[in-house]
Image: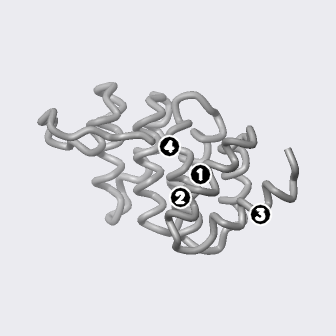
Amino acid sequence: MNSEEVHKYLVCLEGRAAAKKHEAIAKLEALGADIPDLLMKKYKVSRWWSDRASCVYHCIKYAKTNEDAYQIGILALHDKSKVVRHRACALLSVAQKQEAIEHLEDLIFDKASASDATAAIDALTNRSQNYFVDRQHSGKLSLKLE
């Protein structure tokens, strides 16, 4: 795997063009890159909330199987951006690791993120990632993973 090529695609994760970001992730996957590891490194140096939110979002599909993906969710719970914290709660719902509950409980006292943290705890307690989006347990909503 060429590090210049990897860097080129990581740069594409900056900014607001969602299609460009999805394409860059697909190219990195095709190269066999460790996406969660790269996104964790990118997250830690990103100055813009939208870039950090993108890093968390693109780790969601790896949340059940990759420790770096899970850890970016834990780290992002403390982000200054509500959008990033929302995505972190979604990621942890997908990860389905019971130990995430203690981290989510800290977020319950954050007025802006309390409902997301509560929904994530509900999803973990009931062992259904869908309860993060289906907060009424209607069975009509599901959390789709790409």
Residue 138 location in percent, x, y? 12, 36
Q: Which residue is mark 4?
A: 60
Nearer-N-terminus badge (4/2): 4
Nearer-N-terminus badge (2/3): 3
Task: Tell me which residue sits at (60%, 41%) in the image.
Answer: 69
- Residues under numbered marks 2 and 1 in contact, where contact means CB atoms less than 8 Å apart: yes
Above or below, comparing residue 129 to residue 108 in the picture: above
Marks 1/4: CA–CA distance: 14 Å
Q: Dot 3: what SS?
A: helix
Q: Which residue is mark 1?
A: 75
Nearer-N-terminus badge (1/3): 3
Task: Tell me which residue sits at (72%, 40%) in the image.
Answer: 34
Nearer-N-terminus badge (1/4): 4
Q: Is residue 131 left or right of residue 137?
A: right
Going by the numbered disc 4, the residue's amino acid type is Ile
User: In front of the other: label 1 or label 4?
Assistant: 4
Q: Which residue is mark 3?
A: 8
Q: Which residue is mark 2?
A: 78
Q: Dot 4: what SS?
A: helix
How busy is the neighbourhood of tag 2: few (under 14 within 10 Å), some, or many (20 plus)?
A: some
In this figure, which colouring scheme has been used for the structure? one colour
